Amino acid sequence: MSVPGVVEEWIFNIRYPVAVGYVVNLLPTAAYILTIVALLACAQGLHRASPAWSAVVVALALGSRLLGSAMMAGISWELGSDHPAAWHTALLAAGLAGLAPAAWLYRRGDPEAVGPVGGRARRVRLIVIGALAVLVPVLLELLTMQGMASLLGTTWYTLYRHKDAYGDAIGVVALVAVTVLALIAGRWSLAGALTASVAQVAAVLPVTVAFGALAADDPLRLLAAASGVALGALVAGVRWRVPVATALAVLTALILFIAYDATTGDPEKLAAQHVAVPSVLILVLCAAVGGAVTGATAPALAAQGALPAVLGPLVGVLAVGALQAIQAIQATQVTDEFQIVSQDDVIPAAILFLVAGLAISGLGLARLLTARNAERKHAGQIRRESAAAERDRLGRSIHDGVLQVLALVQREGPGLGRQGNELAALAGEQEVALRSMLASEATAARTAPERTATTADLVGPLRGLAAPTVEVATPAQAVELPSAVASEVVAAVRAALDNVRRHAGADARAWILLEEERDGVRVTVRDDGIGFPPERPAEAAEAGRLGIAQSMRGRIADCGGTTTIDSRPGQGSEVEFWIPRAPQGRR
């Protein structure tokens, strides 16, 4: 889609028919929108394997727009590149070079991609919402001043006299329309869209001044923008991305307040006097916050499968609408060299950075509370299942032992005289009471909703094994297996942990890793204990100690899986269980 535009840059005298020229002019914009959505879809696909890399891709995709502005268009033609056609051609060639192997490798689709939760209906709803968000600016572009006057219930002449009100109205209508679409997409989509758009708008405003101050220094401007994008991606990729992004947003707001005071309320002095160091600092921090905050929203949105639709069309239109509304309110000033926004826009930008920091903190806290609530529900389900299993086990023991004895006493007691009759009657009463109790317990277990599921989630039971000396790492989403298989896997992991406690040493630590693969599930139990020789398990089995053979290998083999044990003296031990999706019986 970008090829016609690049060709037109090299060949300046191409004359198209009107209809063809309109399409050629529209293609670069459409290509950019689809590219952003495609990059965000890649980030969505990475979420299951690596949430950190997913957030990094988001930060790079959206944060690099500032780098593109510095390389290409900038704020005016003087801030653009001297060779835009060469840049466009090089970027297009790089994209096509990457497209060829990608199209071959993934010609049948990406098996790791994760779609929206909620099934086909939610997927279609998000696609429709994203398409409608793209159409909002197109429809507003077709809205004439007369149509806007009718919409606002005023006259055309009033809007003509107050053209700023017309631009402000366009921005507000876009904001309201896209906010409604985000609300329809869901509460997580709304929160993520508002947070990311506030960060994007806040980053754009002071960058205008920084670009103006660095207009005469292309390498420094490009280096500062690239450094900011890289810093934002780095923050998005760390584990504590939410608090770090919040701190970065607050720091940037403080820097802007300091710059405003240091220039006696006139930040335009930075541009007019071409002050490099503060301008570079502002450019780096603004680009970093724009990418870091947006990347920090990615895990919450990716968990819902809404990342491409929300951070693409919704955030894009929200940011553009907000900028148009702000610029309609704030007067602009044009100098002989460049156009910059009013000095009053630096303070609103600082306030928006504080709002962005507060918003991403709230979003992170909400996600943390949601995850903990889900973990509590899983833990409660595990406790209920464990209690039911214990009742079943005790019930079998009572049935095979105590009830048989009571029945024997009841049958043989009358032959022992008067005391025997009393003992037989008492045994009969106790047998009836015990059978009634077992029957009621069994009925409760059968009717409990948690016992009706045919599949079970491994994440909750394995997380329940965490302890001060045991760390558990699992995917964020559920990893389901048939209930019977899941219980055997958890039992095998418990047996492996028991071996660690008994044989690895008093100070040994253990780690449990759960991985979901295309055709199975892999669970690894590793410790840093004293280890043992490789021949030890075979010697234990020959000596009649069957803990490993039965508690671990036997259980996993019954599920159709395999068990691999790797240990060396002084190097700890590693036990790996692999279970196929469709158990094939004992092999």
Image (spheres, helix red, strand yellow):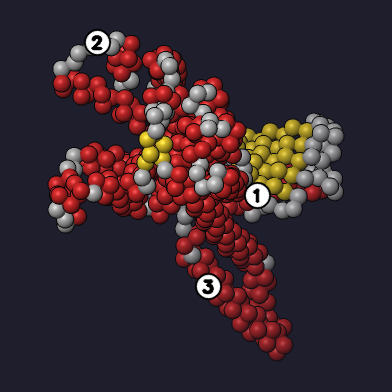
Residue 337 rendering spot, x and y as whole percentages: 41, 28
Quarter holding residue 416: bottom right
The vertical placement of 379 against 360, above or below, is below
277 or 485: nearer the viewer:
277
Which of the two marks, 2 or 3, is nearer to us in this view? 2
Which of the two marks, 1 or 2, is nearer to us in this view? 2
Total marks shown come to 3
The vertical placement of 315 against 46, above or below, is below
Q: Is residue 141 left or right of residue 339?
A: left
Residue 39 rendering spot, x and y as whole percentages: 43, 31
The vertical placement of 65 against 360, above or below, is above
Going 65% across and 68% down the picture, which residue do you hit? 398
Q: Closer to the N terminus: mark 2 or mark 3?
A: 2
For numbered disc 1, what is the local secondary structure? helix
- Indicate the amino acid at tag 2: Asn
Quarter holding residue 377: bottom right
286 or 357: nearer the viewer:
286
Going 54% across and 47% down the picture, which residue do you hit? 264
Which of the two marks, 1 or 3, is nearer to us in this view? 1
419 or 80: nearer the viewer:
80
Quarter holding residue 196: top left
Decide if residue 304 is in sight here.
no
- Provide the residue designation for mark 1: 491
- Provide the residue designation for mark 2: 13
Going 45% across and 41% down the picture, which residue do you hit? 205
The Cα–Cα distance between marks 1 and 3, rounded to whole angstroms, is 27 Å
The Cα–Cα distance between marks 2 and 3, rounded to whole angstroms, is 89 Å
The vertical placement of 535 against 446, above or below, is above
Label annotation for residue 440? 3
The Cα–Cα distance between marks 1 and 2, rounded to whole angstroms, is 75 Å
Quadrant where the C terminus is found in the figure: top right
**Mark 3 surroundings: few (<14), some (14-19) or many (≥20) residues within 10 A:** few
